[in-house]
Amino acid sequence: MTVRVAVVDSGVDTTHAAFASARITTFTVEPKGPVLGVVPGASGDGSGHGTACAGIIHKLVPEADLVSVRALGPDGRGSREALVAALRFCVREGIHVVNLSLGIDLPKASPVRPTDARSILDLYEVADDAFAQGIVLVAAGPNTSTFRTYPGKAKSLIGVGRGSFADPERLESSITGDYELVAAGVDVVAPAVGGGERKWTGTSFACPHVAAHAARVVARLGTKSALEVRAELHAIARRYVSEKEQRREAS
């Protein structure tokens, strides 16, 4: 089973040597009359954020097909409406795994403002639709404990926190109000726009590690249940901890 993994982000520099063997289709969010739509678009990445995330996924699951959906502009910024449009496109297309290293950060010390509530509700509705259709949506959690990040906080998707792990395969279960899995997200080596690599830090770069694991699970089990994939990811995290303890005892 060939798994498709969408990277909703700033685009992908498909000319980078890291993607020489990758199968990537590229789309972009743009106005279509009074609303936003998603159409085939040229490759490219103004900020490098999406290229790094796609590079992490491709390195871990080179057999997966990548779908780049550019929802951010060259400055790395984009509208909430563009984010919602990109996610709805992924759900309509039935893409198996969606990596969302983006979100709305709001201070925990303040209540949600009415102006933010509509966007959050839209994101939650898309996350619920994805879950119901067996699409695994993986979203970055907050980078600091003083913020909450949407939709990564939603429980119908898999929220991801960052850890300082040397092993890119490592997962940890850490069920909190903000996320439920932790992956490598500190000084992660990944492609940089224009060639070469650099180190990246943040939940944005922990997120694609979990998305890659999810793609492997989908390919192996052929499952259409996002809940089953989630359970298997936590099982992988438990096995990693168990194996590490066994190695420590043996030494």
Image (cartoon, helix red, strand yellow):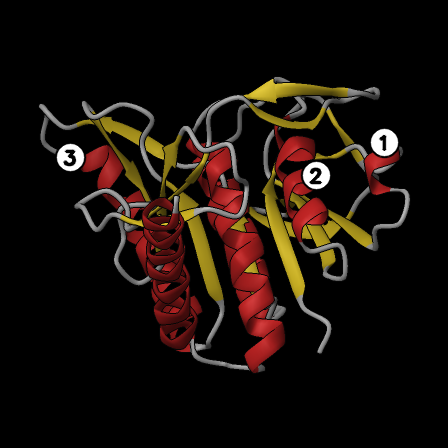
Please say whether residue 153 is visible from this viewpoint: yes
Residue type at numbered disc 3: Val
Q: Position of residue 219 (x, y in %)?
A: 63, 73
The Cα atoms of the two marked residues, 3 and 1, are separated by: 40 Å
Instruction: Report the mark closest to the observer, 2 or 3.
Output: 2
Q: Position of residue 121 (x, y in %)?
A: 27, 52
Left or right: residue 43 versus residue 36 is right
Contact? badges 2 and 1 (CB < 8 Å): yes
| In the image, residue 221 above or below residue 80 | below
Contact? badges 2 and 3 (CB < 8 Å): no
According to the picture, the residue beneath numbered tag 3 turns out to be 112
Task: Say what secondary structure mark 1 lies in.
Answer: loop
Badge 1: how crowded within 10 Å, few (<14), some, or many (20+)?
Answer: some
The quarter of the image holding the C terminus is top left
- The image's mark for residue 55 is 2
Badge 3: how crowded within 10 Å, few (<14), some, or many (20+)?
Answer: few
| In the image, residue 218 above or below residue 89 | below
The image quarter in which residue 19 lies: top right
First in sequence: mark 3 vs mark 1: 1
Contact? badges 3 and 1 (CB < 8 Å): no
The Cα atoms of the two marked residues, 2 and 3, are separated by: 34 Å
Task: Say what secondary structure mark 2 lies in.
Answer: helix
Instruction: Report the mark closest to the observer, 3 or 1.
Output: 1
The quarter of the image holding the N terminus is bottom right
Residue pictured at 36% horizontal, 74% vertical: 227
According to the picture, the residue beneath numbered tag 1 turns out to be 16
Residue pictured at 61% horizontal, 47% vertical: 7
First in sequence: mark 2 vs mark 1: 1
Q: Nearer the viewer, residue 104 or 164?
A: 164
Residue pictured at 53% horizontal, 29% vertical: 78
Residue type at numbered disc 1: His
Q: How many marks?
A: 3
